[in-house]
Amino acid sequence: MGEVGGFPAAKDGRKTPNKTASMNAYKQIISNGFLVILGMAYLIYNTQYPLGTLSKPGPGVFPLILGSMVVLLASAQIIQALRQRQKTKANRTINTAQEVAEVALDERRPWLMALIIAAYITCLNFVGFYISTFLLVIAGSKLMGARDWTRLIALAAGILIACYFIFAMWLRLPLPRGFLF
Amino acid sequence: MGESGFITALSIAMQPANLAACFIGVLIGTLVGVLPGLGPAAAMALALPITFKMGPTAGLIMLAGIYYGSMYGGSTTSILVNVPGEPASVVTALEGYRMARKGRAGAALAVAAIGSFVAGTLAVIALQFFAPPLAAAALAFGPAEYFALTVLGVSVLSLLTGKSRVRSTLMITLGLLLSTVGLDPVEAVERFTFNIPAAGGGLSFIAITAGLFGVAEVFELIAKGDQQIQAMKVRFRDLYPKLEEIKRSIAPILRGSALGFLVGLIPGPAATIASFVSYGIERRFSKHRDEFGTGAIEGVAGPEAANNAAAGGAMVPLLSLGLPFTPATAVLLGGMLLQGVTPGPFLLRDNPQVFWGVIGSFYIGNLMLLILNLPLVGIFASIVRIPARYLVPIILVLCIMGAYGDNNNLFDVWVMLGAGIAGYLMRKCDFEAAPLIVGLVLGTVMERSLRQALVISRGDVAGLLIASPISVVMLIAAVVVIIAPLLWNYAHRQRLANLQM
């Protein structure tokens, strides 16, 4: 299936540029809206740091400038995206449910990988680097569709051996230890 | 000095022990540069105990080898898997990776290696002959000048990267914002740490880079499913650049060398700035402007030459004045002090073999790197054809090790994961990660400069802006960079409107 602007093309092969522009505007509104909220939270949290005076600026000055810039720039992006969305709204011919379903299928695996990495980091100090990393490599490859267990185990073992010699022995990096090793 | 200094430098560097130290250093440096996340400063710091046993000259030659070797290696992962090994290689990924996707990975790597060799050699020649007056010029920079330089850098960067200047500026600002986490650079007040002790030292640059580029790439590969990374089979004759590519690379390499060396004298993330400025210059003046963004060789040659020349330029203040202006040269200073050698004006008088040995090792080291890199280009290029299901875990583990290796702290690995998720979402929403990284690097310098300049000018903002001719020129340049494209676009729209009427 082809792609149009990063989205799956309609199943009948039609290209739908208005659909792409509308989805892009929607994404810009959401993402910049998040940045506005982030900027405002940052500014609110920054109020605890003194601004000082112009001749002796305090630790709150630079964050105040930056937070304000983030809010202003992100707001400008939202306004631009809203204008763009207005222009393309009349020509929208999208099957929204189909789009969401197609996007959802692609997005499950990265989020699953993120959860696996989070579990890996959590387990490091309990199970240790070697066991955790071995399991991480297996899980990551399986998520990508690897089926050959021999190659998987060989890959995991190879990575661990390389890590041991490069980081532990050569660069003398103290790796997290678990209850075994 | 001149010719006799050159001969002295080579004779010291060619001693067997020093030659071996140089080889080990450039090999480690190249590997460190290839491994995403683990930077030269970290690798040099970890190597300090080893160098202590080698004696001052050999030990420092090895540390220096790691430093400029990493510049070579950093370009390798930028080109092959779009994961910059070093911040100075971020811009190489813009064009180099796209060249790799067109099957020209070998040519990109070869041009990067040749450009780095030429730039490194020219930088060493300049270092040898121009160190004293150049170091004096760099010393003229005070806080007001540093601030003006960072403002100019931000303005140029917002122009260079991404499809939208507003979005690029937003990303740079986010990077600056992230740099405020940790200790305030002037009063050491802890900010935005949320009482997490590990955050007191700030967010790890290595962890964020590994996350934004490496982990985000992993997520994208996983989302696409098990596809082989797009690099056509590289035929033997495709491993090396074509004559046309070499011809197109000559001028960018020479420009990058000159620019990089001069920028390298200036305190701060000079190699990164030099590579970005070089990219902007090549993009602006190239006859093949339309190729930029799709794999233009000039976009690899110029920046790679610039970042290597900047590494050479950064050695000038260290060797001549004892002042380290980058994290890597700060570690080098630590290594010298550990050996009982005090860098600065008296280094040449009291320890000439160290001074000339380090300079001589640059000549030898650059040659070694060229010899190592060019024949191995085929091996590096073939790495791209590894199936994603095997490559993904390798990249992931390297990123995790890089993030963890910065401070031996799992907090940095969490930061890496957070940056990876953010980087993946940013890609979905057309936000570029490169400006954010540069903002993160520039943030501390910018804030410290601004606040110190205001203290010096006693709160006189106008006085800060016109503190010296250097700062005035840079601020005017920044204003021109911001306004000129807007005026140009306005004039263009007016002309089009008039034509339609």
Image (cartoon, grey):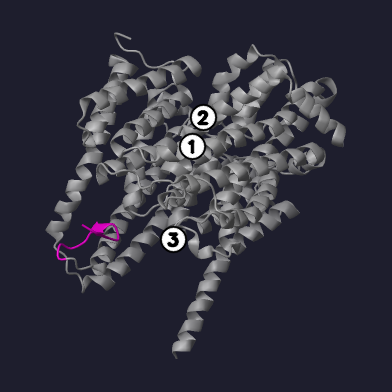
Amino acid type of the residue tagged 2 in the rendering = Val
- Numbered disc in front, either 3 or 1: 1
Q: Is residue A11 above or below residue B94?
A: below
- Residue stretch in magenta: A1-12
* Image quadrant where one finds the C terminus of chain B: bottom left
Say which mark, if any, is on residue B444.
none
Identify which residue is drawn at 59% across, 32% down: B69
Front position in the image: B427 or B138: B427
Q: Is residue B212 above or below residue B152?
A: above
* Image quadrant where one finds the N terminus of chain B: top right
Mark 2: few/some/many CA within 10 Å (<14, 14-19, 20+) = many
Earlier in the chain: of badge 2 and badge 1, it is 2
Circle 2/circle 1 CB separation < 8 Å: yes
**Res A112 quadrant in image:** top left
Query: Can you give x and y, in whole percent of width and height, for residue A159 in the image?
Result: 36, 24
Distance between mark 2 and mark 3 Cα atoms = 33 Å
Say if residue B336 shows up in the picture. no
Query: Can you give x and y, in whole percent of width and height, for residue B95 in the image?
Result: 48, 52
**Res A18 quadrant in image:** bottom left
Identify which residue is drawn at 36% across, 20% down: A160
- Residue A2 falls within the magenta-colored stretch: yes
Query: Can you give x and y, in whole percent of width and height, for residue B244 in the image?
Result: 57, 58
